[in-house]
Image (cartoon, grey):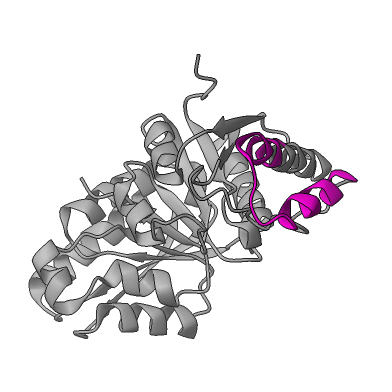
Amino acid sequence: MSNLKPDSVIACLDCPDHVQAVLDASMWAANRLQAPIGLLHSIPSLQQKAAVNYSGCLNIDDESQLLDQFTNQEHLSNSELKAQGRLLLHQATAYCEQHQHKRKTYTLHRHETLSESIDYVDEKSQLIVIGHQVTCRATLSQLVRLSHCPILVTHAPFLPPTTALFAFDNRATSHRMLDWLCKTPLVRSLTVHIVMVGKNSNENCDALREAYARLKQAGISAKKSLIDSRDVSAALSYYQNEHEIGMLMSGAFGQSRLRELLQGSDTKKLLGSTKTPYLLFPKL
C-alpha cells in the first residue's frame, strides 16, 4: 500500500552534495504551500551496487559514522543499499525536526530508479525539489522533461528568494504557468519580474502587458520587461544577474524538438548556467 500523501512537496535526496539544500528548499516551499514533505530516496542501480557518498551531507548524529562506513566500501549488497537509504531518510527527518519544521514529514524509500520514482510521485504532488547534480544515469534535463509536476532545482546552499524572474514567452506552457503562479501561495510574498525576450512588436507588448496585469490582479508584486534579443538564455541570465534576482522560473522545454536540435534548448542552457533555484513548469 502506498504511503504517498496527496499534494506533497517531494524532496529528492539522491544528490549527495545537495541533500541539505534540497531539505531547506523543501521546508521553504512546504511552509508556503501548507503541504507535507515526502522525503524520497531511490536505491541506485542494483546491477551497479556502487556506494554513493552520502558521508557528511547532514551530520545529524552518530549514524553519520555508519554512512561513512558504507561509503568506504567499493560495492554494496542489496541489503546494504537499503540500509544506507534508511539511515539517510532517518537523518533527513531529524534535520527537519531540528529546524523546527512544522509541516508533516514522511519517508518514501523506493527500490527503483530516480526517474521511475519521479513518475510514481509527480501526478499527486504539488512540487518536486531536486539537487542540481544527480547521481543517476539519467541527466537532470531528462528527469525534468519526464515530470508532469512543477520541479524546483536547487544549488547548495539554498537561499530563500525574495525576488523571482518569470521567463514569459507567450506560448501555451507559459500561459499555464501564469495561471498557476496567480493561484499558488508559493510566490505570493515575492516580487516577480516578468521578462519576455523577443522583438519589440505590438503583439509581444500586448501579451506581456496582459500577463503583467494578471499578476498584479492576483495580488503579486510585479515588474515587467521586454528584451529585444535573439539569445534567450543569455538575455535572461544577464537580466537576472543585473537585478540580483533570487529565483528563475520558466516553462520546461517549451520549444519544438526541431528547434532544440537546430539551436539548442533554452531550458537546458539555463539549467547549466543559473546559480539560483530554478522553478520549472511542465510542458503539456
Q: Which quarter of the figure has residue 109?
A: top right
Residue at 35% over, 77% down = 236
Q: Is residue 107 above or below residue 28?
A: above
The rendered magenta stretch, by its main secondary structure, is classed as helix
Q: Answer whether residue 35 is visible to the viewer in this image.
A: no
Residue at 65% over, 54% down = 19
Residue at 37% over, 42% down = 149
Q: Using the image as rendered, state which of residue 15 and residue 222 is in the foreground.
A: 15
Q: From which residue to which does the magenta span run?
A: 62-86
Residue most extreme to the right: 62
- Residue 2 position within the rendered picture, expressed as x and y whole percent measured from the top left: 50, 19
Q: Which quarter of the figure has residue 31?
A: top right
Q: Is residue 240 above or below residue 190?
A: below
Circle count: 0
Judge whether residue 225 is colored magenta: no
Judge whether residue 65 is colored magenta: yes
Residue at 40% over, 45% down = 115
Quarter of the image where the C terminus is located = top left
Q: Using the image as rendered, state which of residue 167 and residue 110 is in the foreground.
A: 110
- In the image: residue 160, left or right of residue 232: right
Q: Is residue 47 above or below residue 123?
A: below
Q: Is residue 57 above or below residue 224?
A: above
- Residue 44 position within the rendered picture, expressed as x and y whole percent measured from the top left: 53, 46
Q: Answer whether residue 232 is visible to the viewer in this image.
A: yes
- Residue 28 position within the rendered picture, expressed as x and y whole percent measured from the top left: 62, 49
